[in-house]
Image (spheres, grey):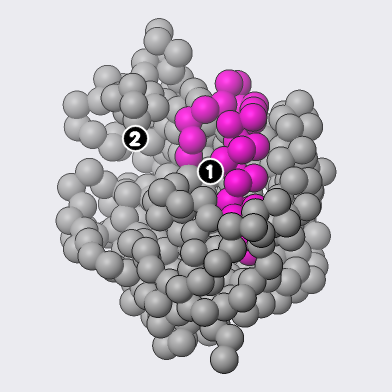
Amino acid sequence: MASLLFSPLTIKNITFKNRIVISPMCQYSAVDGFANNWHLVHLGSRASGGAGLIIQEATAVSPEARISPADLGIWKDGHIEKLKEINDFIVSQNSIPGIQLAHAGRKASVSAPWLGNKKLEESNIGWQTVAPSAIPYHENEPFLPEALDKTGIQKVISDFKNAAKRAVEAGYQVIEIHAAHGYLLHQFLSPLTNVRTDEYGGNFKNRSRFTLEIVEAVQSEWPSDLPLFVRISATDWAEGGWNPEESVQLSQLLKEKGVDLIDVSSGGLVSHQKIAIGPGYQVSFAEKVKKEADILTGAVGLITEAKQAEEILNNSQADLILFARESLRNPNLPLDFAAALNDNIQWPKQYERAKL
């Protein structure tokens, strides 16, 4: 009997050949937002390695939306050409190209991890960050984020809309809106970072408004027959923060809006979070959202073995399995997982002589 992990899944007009997704992973290797051959090889090798869906790293909808100066971007038409080249290769490997559209908010303007992940001031290739409220991520940061006014909010919404339009031109077949990990949309969702008193702050409905408006803006440019995902942090892992119950409520609203799948992660909002990390530590959140909001979910986080992934699917805890660091360790992870589950899948012809 064939495994669930290597069974197809159809969402709208797209059929994923298996349930293995390469999670968006920042490479900090772009210049002025432009992709290059590193991104082609990084993403392309995981497509030839057998994954059903490849989601490109958090891709900035504006220059100030980048986490670091080396993040990928899709804020100008010039970015499209190389992204399309990468996507054409992914498609040639019978995989689906996806993109995660993102705005880092107050967590922007930092150096790459191997350069210390330090806050960059405007005098040192940095920029003014923005947030729902002027609350910094770290207490000792050199400057505060600027609280977005109504004009600023509308600009961000417009940036997401324009990014979605470019994503269509670049040939992506899935968009994931990044509302997790302490970035701008998550900052609006959580009462720990959103202390606004206007219609974008206060109660759950108001804190969710910004994310829902961005979804609508993206949908105005994104074909209705292509899948739309949203990544959320199911909990802040901090007292008084965003919680799993609110995640279910938001997922219900997103389903009503026409979102197809919730990619369920957690944390990243505050530096004092206390995460209970262990194998599959976020899977229960994906299961809760799937069952209580009645929507497709993706599970991610310390899922490292084929049988572990298969069990999550068999237990109806999620519909897709996303792999991040395990995929960094092994670009051919799907080929190895198929062997572990005794599934006979198609290999690239160039590699067939290595198939055991």
Relative vertical location of residue 212 with respect to residue 118 in this rendering, above or below? below
Relative vertical location of residue 231 with respect to residue 251 in this rendering, above or below? above
Residue at left offset 22%, top offset 43%: 271
Q: Position of residue 124 (x, y in %)?
A: 40, 10
The residue segment tinted magenta is: 26-52
User: Residue 4 is drawn in which quadrant?
Assistant: bottom right
* Residue denoted by label 1: 58
Residue at left offset 46%, top offset 52%: 330
Relative vertical location of residue 46 with respect to residue 148 in this rendering, above or below? below
Q: Residue furthest top?
A: 123
User: Residue 229 is drawn in which quadrant?
Assistant: bottom right
Q: Nearer the viewer, residue 121 or 231?
A: 231
Q: Is residue 74 visible?
A: yes
- Residue type at tag 2: Ala
* Residue denoted by label 2: 134
Residue at left offset 22%, top offset 61%: 277
Q: Position of residue 308 (x, y in %)?
A: 37, 75
- Residue type at tag 1: Ala
Q: Position of residue 258 (x, y in %)?
A: 67, 71
Q: Earlier in the sequence, mark 1 or mark 2?
A: 1
Helix, strand or loop at label 2? It is loop
Q: Is residue 233 magenta?
A: no
Q: Is residue 46 magenta?
A: yes
